[in-house]
Amino acid sequence: LILDDEIESRRIFEFLLEKYDDISIIASEGNADVALEKMKNLHPDIVFMDINLKDRNAFSVLKSIRTYNLKATVVFFTAYYDFAIEAIRNSVFDYLLKPIDPEELASTIERFRLSQQEADNQEKNDALFNLMQLNSKLKFNIKSGSIFLHPNEIVYCEADGNYTILYIDSQKKEVVTAKLGQVEELLPSISFIRLGRSHIINADYLTKIDRKRHSIELNKEGERFELYLSSKIINKFLN
């Protein structure tokens, strides 16, 4: 299955894949939600997906693939050198740069064939998902455009109606045009923890939980942040 919101790019990719007798293109889509529905119904063995989609973030799509427990190998491609390509290439999966090099694609196809001899692609998708999130900047929309932040730059996130405030340090914060739940989908789950309806914290900066004060303390490079939460959230967090 091919997922790319640029029709010309999809056609080129389809042309390149037609030379492989053992690969059949069961779907070629420009919309992420439509592609996910087809994945659930058609169960492709391999998904070629552009990282820079207009309707959904690639992390969100990959998270849905994991949630639905789809047993597909995922290969990303993009026109931008955004991520740690060599690190990702050390896994079974691959990452291709546009314009697609036929020899690079051939190498990816061969890796895919070899991967079919191994078990559980779900674990590989999990590993790829975490690797991508840890080694890349995330794009957030703001009123005036977009910002790009590495996950480790964020100390915590706070809901503000239809917006979310990202706290970078004591002097800097960014208001992004996304609800807290949407921001949560972008953040690596191995580092970030949702606390109730209003906060997400970076657990790497967590230094103290105070049951009596109903608060938690975060510390980033000597800067201290204290959040006051309900006793219910504190107790749930401790348990």
Image (tube, rainbow, N blue to C red):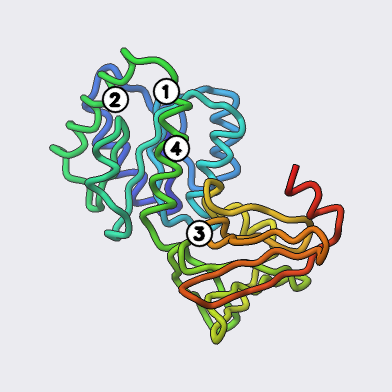
C-alpha gap between disc 4 and disc 3:
16 Å
Q: Earlier in the sequence, mark 3 or mark 2?
A: 3
| Residue occupied by mark 3 | 54
Q: Earlier in the sequence, mark 4 or mark 1?
A: 4
| Residue occupied by mark 2 | 112
- Of the residues shown, which amino acid type is indicated by label 1? Asp
Q: Looking at the rendered structure, which numbered label has been put on residue 45?
A: 1
Q: Indicate left or right for 215 with 58 as reference.
A: right
x, y percentage for residue 238? 73, 47
Tags 3 and 2 touching, CB below 8 Å: no
- Of the residues shown, which amino acid type is indicated by label 3? Lys
Q: Earlier in the sequence, mark 3 or mark 1?
A: 1
C-alpha gap between disc 2 and disc 1:
9 Å
Query: Quick one: 126 or 29, which is closer to the camera?
Result: 126
- Of the residues shown, which amino acid type is indicated by label 4? Ser
C-alpha gap between disc 2 and disc 4:
19 Å
* Image: 98 above or below 166: above
Total numbered badges shown on the rendered structure: 4
* Image: 4 above or below 107: below
Q: 10 Å neighbourhood of mark 1: few (<14), some, or many (≥20)?
A: some
* Image: 229 above or below 26: below
C-alpha gap between disc 3 and disc 1:
24 Å
x, y percentage for residue 169? 53, 78
